[in-house]
Image (cartoon, helix red, strand yellow):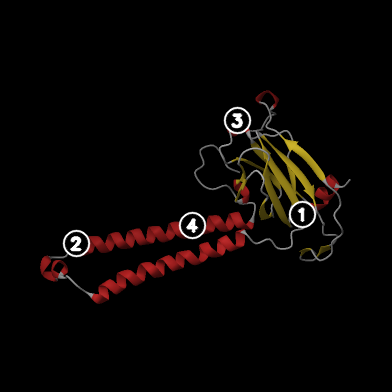
């Protein structure tokens, strides 16, 4: 959970978010190494006496090859993990639940359907091969709580009147759309920022492996009350989720 004055990322509640944080650390460490190494090289090179040859070297094929090949190798080494992450963010492995989030000025509406819950618990976790048909549908609208209605411990401008339930431990397909202007369904704990556009359906896969309550906000300027359009999500066990949406 993020706290007042914190400067680091939120604790990831999905594998994608944790991988994004790790990728960020890899890039930062590489930049520090390169900055220190290049600064040391430049300082040592400039401090060489003129008779050591640095100021009279006008052409060197080996030097030109080196300072061309090394940056290319560095960029490729940084490109590969980033490219792999982009592919993983679009990968949705057999989604068992579909949630549609529709943005409106200035609230969210949720519709649930196409949910096939695992019916057995294996030794290594839920056996996704044992499923039963969709158990029903469930829909509601989510509004920000007024400041006068806040309870002890609830956050101003982030508390909502009804949390959106999501099942834990299975792939969820989030479908985003809008009824008026462009909004953005963003929950930092999930590593998700999905722009929702009027007249279009935007698909975003998620795998939530930590239960709890998570907050987010609309991340696209959508009008005068843009700052008062929070997102509240509660990740619960799939048994509790089944009981909740079962007709």
Residue at the location (78% across, 47% down)? Answer: 112
Residue at the location (51% across, 38% down)? Answer: 5
> Is label 3 in a helix, a strand or a loop?
loop
Residue at the location (30% across, 69% down)? Answer: 67
Which residue in the protein does label 3 denote?
225
The x and y percentages for residue 81 are 52, 65
The extreme front residue here reads 199
Q: Nearer the viewer, residue 109 or 40?
A: 109
Q: Earlier in the sequence, mark 4 or mark 2?
A: 4
The x and y percentages for residue 26 are 48, 60
Q: Earlier in the sequence, mark 3 or mark 1?
A: 1
Which residue in the protein does label 1 denote?
97
Of circles 2 and 3, the one toward us is 3
Which residue in the protein does label 2 denote?
46
Quadrant placement of the N terminus: top right
Q: Earlier in the sequence, mark 4 or mark 1?
A: 4
Measure the alpha-carbon separation of dots 2 and 3: 57 Å
């Amino acid at each position: 959970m993020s706290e007042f004055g914190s400067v680091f990322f939120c604790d990831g509640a999905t594998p994608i978010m944790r991988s994004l944080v790790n990728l960020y650390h890899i890039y930062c460490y590489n930049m520090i190494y390169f900055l220190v190494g290049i600064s040391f090289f430049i300082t040592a090179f400039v401090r060489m006496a003129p008779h050591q040859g640095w100021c009279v070297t006008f052409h060197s094929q080996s030097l030109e090859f080196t300072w061309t090949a090394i940056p290319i190798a560095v960029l490729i080494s940084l490109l590969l993990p980033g490219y792999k992450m982009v592919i993983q963010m679009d990968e949705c492995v057999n989604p068992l639940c579909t949630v549609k989030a529709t943005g409106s000025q200035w609230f969210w509406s949720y519709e649930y359907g196409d949910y096939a819950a695992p019916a057995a618990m294996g030794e290594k976790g839920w056996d996704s091969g044992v499923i039963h048909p969709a158990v029903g549908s469930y829909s509601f609208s989510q509004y920000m709580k007024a400041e006068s209605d806040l309870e002890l411990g609830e956050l101003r401008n982030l508390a909502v009147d009804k949390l959106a339930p999501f099942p834990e431990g299975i792939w969820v397909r989030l479908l985003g759309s809008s009824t008026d202007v462009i909004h953005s369904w963003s929950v930092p704990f999930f590593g998700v920022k999905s722009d929702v556009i009027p007249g279009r359906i935007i698909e975003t896969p998620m795998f939530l492996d930590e239960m709890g309550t998570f907050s987010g906000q609309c991340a696209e300027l959508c009008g005068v009350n843009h700052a008062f359009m929070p997102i509240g999500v509660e990740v619960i066990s799939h048994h509790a989720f089944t009981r909740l949406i079962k007709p």
